[in-house]
Amino acid sequence: MTRVGGPGAGGDAATLGDPVALVGGTSPADLSVVAGGASAAVLLVDLATRTVVHANPVAEQLAPGVELPVGLDRWSDVADLRDVDGAALSGTGHPLSRVARSLPVAGQAVSAARLSELGRRREPLWVVALPMLGAPALADHALVAFLPLSRREAARDAADAAQAQAQVRDRAVLATGMSFTVADARSGDAPLVWVNPAFTAMTGYSLQEAVGRNCRFLQGPGTDRAAVAAVGRALAAGEELTVTLLNHRKDGTAFWNQLTLSPVHGPDGELTHYVGIQTDVTARVAADDERDRALAAERTARAQAEAARRDAEESRGRLELLAEATSRLAVTLDVAECRQRLLDVAVPVLADWALVIATDEHGSVADVTARHRDPARAGDLHRYVEHWATALAPGPVRATLLGGEHARRISDYDAEERRRERETWVNDAAVLELSDALGAASVLLVTLPGRQGSEDVLALVRGPGRSRHTEDDLHVAVDLGRRAGLIIDNARLYGEQHRIAATLQNSLLPHLPAIPGVRAAARYRASESGARVGGDFYELIDLPGEAVGLAVGDVVGHDVMAAAAMGHLRGLLRASAWDTTGPSPETVLDRVDRLLDGLGMTTMATLAYARATPAEDGTWLLEHATAGHPPLMVRSPDGRVDALDDVHGLMLGVQPTARAGARRRLVPGSTVLAYTDGLVERRGEELTTGLARLARTFAEAPQDVEGLCEHLLARLGDTDDDVAFVALQLGPR
C-alpha cells in the first residue's frame, strides 16, 4: 500500500492485520480500522434467491472451485466458516443467513480454513454485510465483506466493540465505521452505484449525490496526480489497489483517504463492479508527519553526536588495537610466532593482506611472513611472496628495509601514474600483476625497530573496496611497529641465547665409546617448547677391568648455567668412577658429593650410576646406586621389565652423606635403561603412572638398542621437559 497526493505523505495505514490497530494506540471501539489496507473478500448477494452472484478474487480463493451463482449456505460450507472458537455456525446465527433476510450484519467474527492470500492457517475474519438499498439495479442485493483479522484476540476485541456500540445505536448504523462504495465496472467512467451511510458521514455526500458520479469528485488541487493515475491504471486493468490520497469533503475540508479497490466478477467471470473500502486516516497521517519531523530532527542530532563521537571511538579503537597487539605478542618468545601474531592483529583492521619482511645484516630479504583476510587467497599470496622476495629493486620498499625511511604511506598505490613508478621498484613484472590480483590500492610501510636497529618491515595493504589509509592509520601502524619490534627483538635475543645454550649442552654430551661385549645407544631431546635448556646428561664409561660404567643425571635449572654445571658434574663423575680399585656406585656418588661440597660448587642434581662387571659364569654383576633419581630399569631377554627401586638416596649438592647400593645378577641379553625424569613425568600426573607407562613401552620396544631408543623417543619424547636416556645391552662373555 502506498500514500501519495500531498505534503506529509507517510507510512501504511493501520489495519486489522496490525495488532496495534485494536490493542494499542487505537480504541477497539473505533471500527474504522477494520478496513485498513488488507485484502478483503467481497460478495454481492441476490437477496431474493439467497445466492452469491458476484465475487472478487479473494472471495474465490476462500471458496475455491465454486461456480457462480451459488447458494449462500453452499458458499459458506465450501469456505468452511466457523466462529472464532472453531465451532460450526448455527443456521439461525449464520451472518450470511441474516443478510439473506435483509438484516444488516454490522460486524461478526468468523474464521475460514481455505488457503489464500489471507494466510496459510485458519484465519479470523470480520464480516460486514449491508443491503444495498437505493442502488440502481442492485436494490435487492447485499454487499458482504470479509476483512482479515491478524489474531483471534483482535476478533474478540472487534466483536466486543460491536456489542458495546449496539447498545447505543441501531445495528445498521454500526457499519458507518467502515465506508463502502460500489462502482459499475461495465460503464466506461466507473460511476458509483451505491454508497453506505459511512461514506456520507465521512464525505458529506449523500447516496443521491454520489450515485452516477465517478469518485474523482472527491479530488482537489492538492491531490497528487500520480495517485489518480494509479487508480486509473488499476480500474483499466481490473486489479486490486490500495492507495492513500488527499480528498475533500463536500464542505471543502481536506482529509486523507485510504482507498482499497477490489474487482468483483459475475458468474461468467466478467468484471462487473468495483467495491471500495475507504477510511479517513487524517489523524494517523498527521501523526506520521509529526513523527517524520521528529525522526528527521533526531537523525540530525544523532548524526552530529555520531560525528562528535567518531573521533573518540576511533581513538579508543586504536588504543584497543595496540593493547591487543601487546598482549598477544608478549605471550610467546618464538620469533616466527610473534610475526604471525602481529599479522593476525593487523588483518583485517589495518589491511586486507599484510607482510612481515625480515632482513639480514645486509638488508637483504631473509624471510617473509604473509597473511590474507580471505584464507582462499593463501595460495595467491604465497606465489606473490615467492616472486617478490627475489624481484625487489631500489624503491621505497628497499629504502624502508635499509633504514632510509621509518614509515611511508602510499594511498594512491593503484593510480596509473603510480604504476609506472612501481615498475621501477621490482625487476619482475609478474610481481605487479600478482599484487593487483590480490588487490592493492593503498599501502603502509613501517619498520619494526629493535635495540640494534630495524631488521623487520611491516607492509599493510588495502584493496580497492576499502577506504584508503589515512595519516591516523599511519600513526597507529608506526606505534604498532615500535611495540612489535621490541617484542620480536626480545624473542630473537632469547632464541639466540637458547641456541647458544643448546649448542653448549649438545657439545657436552658424549659420543658413546665402543666397548667390547656390550652395545649401547643414547638419545637427547630438548623440550618441545624450545623455551628452555637444561642440565640433562648421560654417560657411558669404559672402566678398568672390563667393567662398564653407566650414568644419567639432571642438574637443577634450565639455563646456560645449568648446562655449564652439567659439564662440571660429568667431569667429577668420570674422575670419581675411574679407579683401578673398582669403587662401588655408592662410593662414586659419595665422592662426587664431597667434591661438590669441597670445591664450593652450588650445583644440585639428581644422578643414577651403575657398574656392570662380567662374571666367570658368563653372567653380569650389576651394581647400582641413586642420588634422588628415578630408578634404572632392566629388561630380561624374555621381555620382563623390572625397576631397580630397591635403593634410594638424597640428591647431590644438598648434604654429603653415606649412600647405599644394591647388586643384581643379569643374564646375557639383558638391557639396562637409564633415563631422566622428562621421559616419565607429565604435568598433573603421579610419577608411578609415568613409570608404569615407561615399563610397558620398554617391554614392547625392539631388541636392538638403536631401535629401542627410537621407539622410546617416538612414544614418550613429546614432553615439555628435556629428555635424556641411554640403553646398555649386555652381551655374552
Image: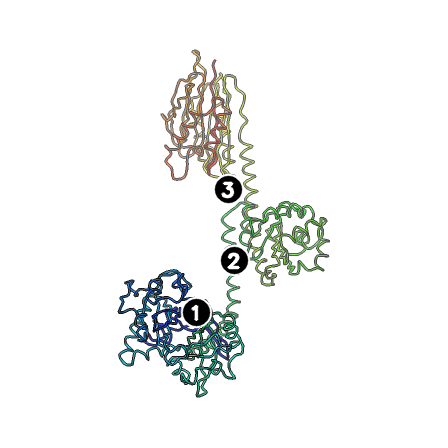
Q: Amino acid at mark 1?
A: Gly
In the displayed orientation, state which residue is furthest to the bottom. Answer: 251
Question: x and y percent of residue 599 in the render?
Answer: 47, 33
Colouring chosen for the image of the structure: rainbow
At label 1, counting other C-alpha atoms closer than 10 Å, the crowd grade (few under 14, some 14-19, many 20 or more) is some
Kindly report which numbered mark, 2 or 1, lies closer to the viewer in this rendering: 1
Compare residues 512 and 99 and report the one nearer the observer. 99
Reading the image, the residue beneath label 2 is: 321
Disc assigned to residue 389: none
Kindly report which numbered mark, 3 or 1, lies closer to the viewer in this rendering: 1
Reading the image, the residue beneath label 1 is: 266
Reading the image, the residue beneath label 3 is: 531
Callout 2: SS? helix
Q: Amino acid at mark 3?
A: Ala
Callout 1: SS? loop
Compare residues 166 and 336 and report the one nearer the observer. 166
